[in-house]
Amino acid sequence: MDFTSLYADYYKRQTLIDAYSVPIIPVGHPSTWIVPSDIAERVVLNPSSRRQAGRPKASRRISSSERTTTQNCRRCGQPGCNSRRCSNPALTNEGLSRVIPEEYRHKCSICHTVGHNRQTCPTRGSTVE
């Protein structure tokens, strides 16, 4: 069975060769074009655009079931202010550090205590029971 009979001539190699066998002449600069006067007088307007359906995302109403979170400033720790324009005095390191519960802190995989990892474990060489 000849499979070339199953698809259009558009996809055949000879069609591509025939399309580019004729030399392609460049259009040139628009100032050198000869435009008929009836075409030059036509006013071409932009296509009419339609507003998308639905409420705009910027003015979306937040439902009562959605929780709103307020961001705290990294510099002073106060809500509603940001570190770029903050004029409040900066907190010390212990004021900025957040308290992480012990069950969520990383523990040593050898002795299971918080504060170090297995590389720096003091009981690394000895056996732990």
Image (cartoon, rainbow, N blue to C red):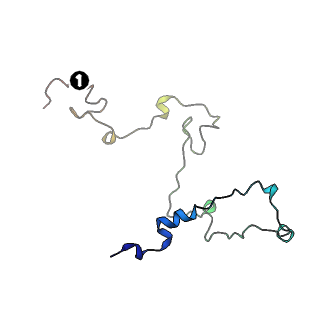
Q: Name the image quarter holding the N terminus.
A: bottom left
**Which residue is pictured at 54% across the width and 31% down the height?**
91
- Disc 1 residue type (three-letter): Pro
Residue 71 drawn at (x, y percent): 54, 46
Quadrant hosting residue 23:
bottom right
Camera-nearest residue between 30 and 72: 30
Q: How many marks?
A: 1
Above or below 60: residue 2? below
Q: Secondary structure at mark 1?
A: loop
The reply, left or right, for residue 4 in relation to residue 58 is left
- The residue closer to the viewer here, 9 or 77, is 9
31 left or right, relative to 121:
right
Q: Is residue 81 left or right of residue 40?
A: left
Q: Which residue is mark 1?
A: 122
Identify which residue, 86 or 45, lies in the foreground.
Answer: 45
Q: Residue at x 15, y 24 (%)?
A: 126
Image x and y of residue 82, in percent: 60, 41
Q: Quadrant of residue 51?
A: bottom right
Kindly indicate the quadrant of the structure image that contains residue 21: bottom right
